[in-house]
Amino acid sequence: MRKAKSAAILAPMLALLLIAPLLVSAPYEDLKRRFRLDLPDGWRWTPQPGDTLGEWFRKEDTGAIGNFGVRVVKLTGTMTLQDFAAQTENAMKSEPGYRKLLEQASMLGTHPTIKREYVMDVSGSDAVQRRAQEQFLVNGEYGFWLHFETLAEGFDLFQRDVDHLLAGFVPISGGQRAKVAGKKAEKIIGRWNKVEDNLRFDLRLDGTFTLGDQTGTYVIDEDELTITIPGKVVEKFHYAFLNNELVIAGPHLDEPIHYRRVAGPAAPLFGTWRPRGRKGDLRLTSGGAFIYGTTSGNYHLNADLLTMKRKDGVELTYVFLLDGDLFKLSGGDLSDEVVFDRVK
C-alpha cells in the first residue's frame, strides 16, 4: 500500500442501532439466524416455497398489498457492494417496463448502502405498474438485498412502514466482534480524530472500521493492528498510547500518525427530552437507565456515542451531540437526525 493510502486508511463512525419503534411492532428473527427486524403492525411472514435465500413479508390492509423481502447471499471473491447491487439490477432489467427512478449512496445504521427505486409492468399488462424500493448492504462476506414493492399508485401508503422495517433491520450473517487481545487493546475501540487534520477514524465493536471513504475490518493482537479493505489491501500497524493520544506507526508511513479520542459531553445528559416532530419523551436517569415510550433499559456513554441496551437484550448505539438544552441523535434506526429539547 502506498504511503498516502496508508494514512488515509484509518477514520469515522461506530455502531448505531435503534431506540424504540414509533409504530406498534413485533421483533422477528430469521429461522436461519441470518437477520432480524421489527415487523410493524399488520405485517406477516409469508414464506415462499423453494426460496432458500431469504424471507418475505406482506401487508394487505392499507388499500393495497405491500411485499417486503430480505435476501441473503454469500459473496464470492472480491465482490463489492457496487458489484452486488449491479448484479441484481442486471437481473431486473429484463422485466417488461423496467425504468429506474433513483439510485444513490445511503446508510442503514453503520452500514453503507446503495438505495434504488424503479417501476416495471405488472405481468401481463403494460397499463399497470408496480414500484419497488431496494437497499443493498454488505456485512462481512454476506450481501443483503432488502426489497419492497407494491402497485405504483399505492406506494406512498407504505412509506412509513418501509422506513420502520429498514430502521429495525439488523444483519446477523457475516457479523463478528472485534478480535482483541489484552486490556490495552480494548482501549483502542471507539472514535478518534487525527490530530493533523481531524480526519475521523472509527474502530467499531463489530470489528469494522471507517476512515474517510474507506471501510473494512480490523483485528487487534496486543500492540498490533491489522486492517483489511476487502479486495484491496491487508496491512499491519503498531500502535501505542502516548499522552492520551493513539499513535499508529507502520513500515509504509513516513512518520507515526496521532489521533485524539472524540470528546464526550461537557454537560450532563440525564433528564427528560422531547423530540421535535415525534411523539413520546425520552428519559435518561443519572443512574444509567432509560425509558422511551413502552421501551426501557440501560444506557452508557463513550465519547460521542450513546449505547442503549433494551430489556429484551438488543443493544443499539447512536451518535449524539449535546449543546445545553439541545440534544441531537443520528444513526441507528434514524433516517435523519432527530433533535430533542430538554423538558424543564
Image: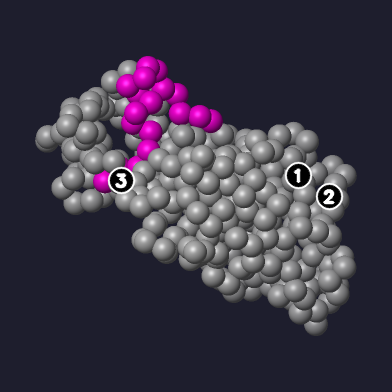
**Number of numbered tags placed on the structure image:** 3
Is residue 216 among the parts visible in the rendering? no
CA–CA distance between discs 1 and 3? 35 Å
Front one among 18 and 136: 18
| Above or below: residue 318 compared with residue 315 | below
Percent across and percent down for residue 140 are: 53, 36
The 10 Å Cα crowd at callout 1, few under 14, some 14 to 19, many 20 or more, is: some
Residue 179 magenta: yes
Give, as a three-letter code, the residue at label 1: Tyr
* Label 3 element class: loop
Q: Residue at x 19, y 38 (%)?
A: 258
Task: Please report contact status of discs 2 and 1: CB closer than 8 Å, yes or no.
Answer: yes
Amino acid type assigned to the residue bearing label 2 in the image: Trp
Circle nearer the N terminus (2, 1): 1
Disc number at residue 45? Answer: 2
What residue do we see at 53% from left, 57% from top?
272
- Name the quarter where the N terminus is drawn: top left
Q: How dense is the environment of label 2, judged by Cα within 10 Å: few (below 14), some, or many (20 and up)?
A: some
Does any portion of residue 303 appear in the rendered image? yes
The Cα atoms of the two marked residues, 2 and 1, are separated by 9 Å
The picture places residue 129, in percent across and down from the top left corner, at 76, 76
Instruction: Give the residue pinned by disc 1.
Output: 28
Tell me where the magenta segment starts and ends, as one range. Answer: 176-193
Of the pair 50 and 223, the residue shown nearer to us: 223
Label 3, on which residue? 262
Give left or right: position of 150 versus 79.
right
User: In terms of image quadrants, where is residue 9?
Assistant: top left
- Dot 3 amino acid type: Val
